[in-house]
Amino acid sequence: MKAPRSRGSQFYLIQLLAVLVGLGMVVVGPWRTGVAVVGAAFIVGAVARTVVPVSHTGMLRVRGKAFDIVWMTLLGVSLVVLSLVIPDQPG
């Protein structure tokens, strides 16, 4: 299997892998850490969308650049904050 040629596609696959790892952590047990990992993956994706030139965005480009950056940042920050503010539940 060949690696993706565009830098954006490489970032996209790294982001996808990080989301899968985070979701796996949610399933296995440390859900706060897993949700924070998923959120961090979206924040890194937003930074990558900001930095990578349009000619190399590949699969990282979904809609317009501004929409992608705002949406991924909002989602990432929301998930990280969610993982921090939900109180512990008595078990």
Image: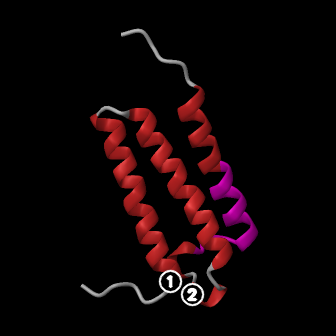
- Nearer to me, 71 or 45: 45
Q: Is residue 41 above or below residue 39?
A: below
Query: Badge 1, how many Cα within 10 Å: few under 14, some, many 20+?
Result: some
- Going by the picture, which residue comes out furthest to the right? 66
* Mark 1 vs 2, N-terminal side: 1
- Residue 64 vs residue 88: left or right? right
* Circle on res. 7: 1
Tell me which amino acid carries mark 1. Arg
- Residue 44 falls in which quadrant of the image? bottom right
Q: Which residues are magenta?
A: 61-74
Comparing 80 with 71, the one in front is 80
What residue lies at 54% left-to-right and 48% top-to-bottom?
39
Q: Is residue 28 above or below residue 61?
A: above
Would residue 24 be found to the left or right of residue 69 on screen? left
Q: Which mark is residue 41?
A: none
Residue in the picture at 63% in, 64% down: 46
Is residue 9 left or right of 46 when viewed as pictured? left
Instruction: State the image coordinates of residue 11 (x, y, percent, origin top left).
Output: 48, 73
Above or below: residue 55 compared with residue 81: below
Residue 62 magenta-highlighted: yes
Q: Are marks 1 and 2 in contact (CB under 8 Å)?
A: yes
Q: Which mark is residue 56?
A: 2
Identity, as a three-letter code, of the amino acid under mark 2:
His
